[in-house]
Image: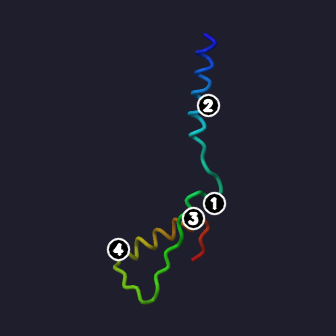
Amino acid sequence: MRCTTLTGLVLSAGLTAGCAIETGGMRGDCDLAAPIRPSRQDVLSAQTLAQIVAHNEVGATLCGWVP
C-alpha cells in the first residue's frame, strides 16, 4: 500500500509541474524572436504586411517590444 501511495504522489507532482504558467512580460520565446522591421526598399503585399503587423503586435504585448 505504501508503494502505491508513493507512486501516486510522484506522478501527481510530475503532472502538476507541467501546468505551471509564466507570468509577467518576459517569456522564453522573447529570446528567440524579434520585431520585423522592413526597409523602405522592401515591396510587401497586403497579406505580408498584415502578418508583419500581427507578429509585431504580439511581440509588443508578450515581450514588451517598442515599435
Furthest-top residue in this view: 1
Between the residue at mark 1 and the residue at mark 2, the CA separation in whole angstroms equals: 27 Å
User: Nearer the N terminus, badge 1 or badge 4?
Assistant: 1
Between the residue at mark 3 and the residue at mark 1, the CA separation in whole angstroms equals: 8 Å
**Contact between labelled residues 1 and 3, with CB atoms less than 8 Å apart:** no
Tell me the residue that label 3 is attached to.
Answer: 61
Q: Closer to the observer: label 2 or label 4?
A: 2
Furthest-right residue in this view: 24
**Contact between labelled residues 4 and 2, with CB atoms less than 8 Å apart:** no
Q: Residue at x 58, y 22 (%)?
A: 8
Tell me the residue that label 4 is attached to.
Answer: 47
Tell me the residue that label 2 is attached to.
Answer: 13
Residue density around tag 1, few if under 14, some if 14–19, many if 20 or more, within 10 Å: few
User: Nearer the N terminus, badge 3 or badge 1?
Assistant: 1
User: Nearer the N terminus, badge 4 or badge 3?
Assistant: 4
Q: Amino acid at mark 1?
A: Gly
Q: Amino acid at mark 2?
A: Ala
**In the drawing, what numbered circle is on residue 64?**
none
User: Nearer the N terminus, badge 2 or badge 3?
Assistant: 2
User: Nearer the N terminus, badge 1 or badge 2?
Assistant: 2
Between the residue at mark 4 and the residue at mark 3, the CA separation in whole angstroms equals: 21 Å
Percent x, y of residue 38: 46, 81
Between the residue at mark 2 and the residue at mark 4, the CA separation in whole angstroms equals: 45 Å
Q: Amino acid at mark 3?
A: Thr
Check the picture and name the quadrant holding the C terminus.
bottom right
Residue density around tag 3, few if under 14, some if 14–19, many if 20 or more, within 10 Å: few
**In the drawing, what numbered circle is on residue 25?**
1
Between the residue at mark 1 and the residue at mark 4, the CA separation in whole angstroms equals: 28 Å
